[in-house]
Image: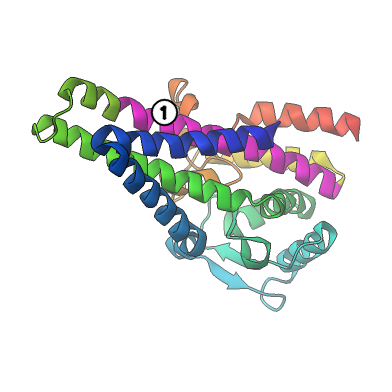
Amino acid sequence: MEIFKTVFFMTALMLLLIFIGGYVGGGGGMLIAFAIGAAVNFFSYFFSDKLVLRHYRAVEVNRQNAKGFYEIVERLAKKADIPMPKVYIIPEAVPNAFATGRNRSNAAVCATEGLLNLLSEEEIEGVMAHELSHVRHYDILIGSMAATIAGAIAIAANILQYGALLGRNRQNPIVMIAIAIVLPIAAAIIQMSISRSREYMADEGAARLTAHPEWLQSALLKLDAYARGGTMRQASQESAHMFIVNPFSGKNISFASLFSTHPSIENRIARLEKLKNAL
């Protein structure tokens, strides 16, 4: 069901982008919009992982300088039957983690110093199992593409809005402004829906990989409590969907939860509890 939702929402994002192109430029505009969508996905496929690691100043580690952490990832990768990913640590006190990379053979998992200091070994294993589940299911690629397409829609909508205000388009300016406002919101909601679906899948994958859903449950409770009290220094809205817990949890209000990149911790804990009983 979650896979079907992801395919549906990814298709909807592309259609929104093509709709903007068609509204502005007819058939030619649709082709241009499609080409833009293909181009941004190409860029996201090959370069998004490098950019995000550089943005967070992540430092690659190995068995010699991060033995315990490295061996946890190594053990889980073997159990998941995927290539050993690169392992990074972010010099950041706020605990969090994410995975990135375009496929299983070019993946990386990343944790902050705060996470490694806060969690027990079992909880770290639960978190890393979650991130490796993202790698197994290509979630990191899907999330990056969704974010890039949503960004392209926002840029196109801004161009549409300014064109209407300056009277440089023959279309009804009121309709154009309405479209320019509504479409980025729709794109954001679709992007968040994709991210939420993949988080539930990764939670389930982690529970099955470790056979101990309670490890991830405990880690999520600690990470969420800490996230509500502080925000990562380098955190950005563009990469928020990548983290195991929303780095902006402390800034969320009830209405803003509609646009949250993550399902609520309460819902994630409840799903893991059901899975724990099933296992």
* Neighbourhood count class around disc 1 (C-alpha, 10 Å): few under 14, some 14–19, many 20 upward: some
Q: Is residue 157 above or below residue 53?
A: above
Magenta residue check for 206: yes
Which picture quadrant has residue 62? Answer: bottom right
Image coordinates for residue 122, horizontal then vertical, percent: 79, 51
Q: For the magenta stretch, what is the residue range?
A: 181-210
Image coordinates for residue 92, horizontal then vertical, percent: 51, 57
Which picture quadrant has residue 278? Answer: top right
Work out whether residue 221 can be spotted. no
Q: Residue at x 47, y 49 (%)?
A: 239
Q: Nearer the viewer, residue 79 or 254?
A: 79
Image coordinates for residue 194, horizontal then vertical, percent: 56, 36
Q: Is residue 243 above or below residue 12?
A: below
Residue type of the residue flagged with mark 1: Ala
Q: Residue at x 80, y 42 (%)?
A: 207
* Quarter that holds the N terminus: top right
Disc 1 secondary structure class: helix
Q: Residue at x 72, y 50 (%)?
A: 133
Magenta residue check for 7: no
Instruction: Name the image colouring.
Output: rainbow
Which picture quadrant has residue 103? Answer: bottom right
Q: Nearer the viewer, residue 146 or 133?
A: 146
Work out whether residue 44 can be spotted. yes
Determine the main secondary structure of the stretch shown in magenta: helix
Question: Mark 1 = which residue?
Answer: 186
| Residue lying furthest bottom | 64
Number of numbered discs: 1
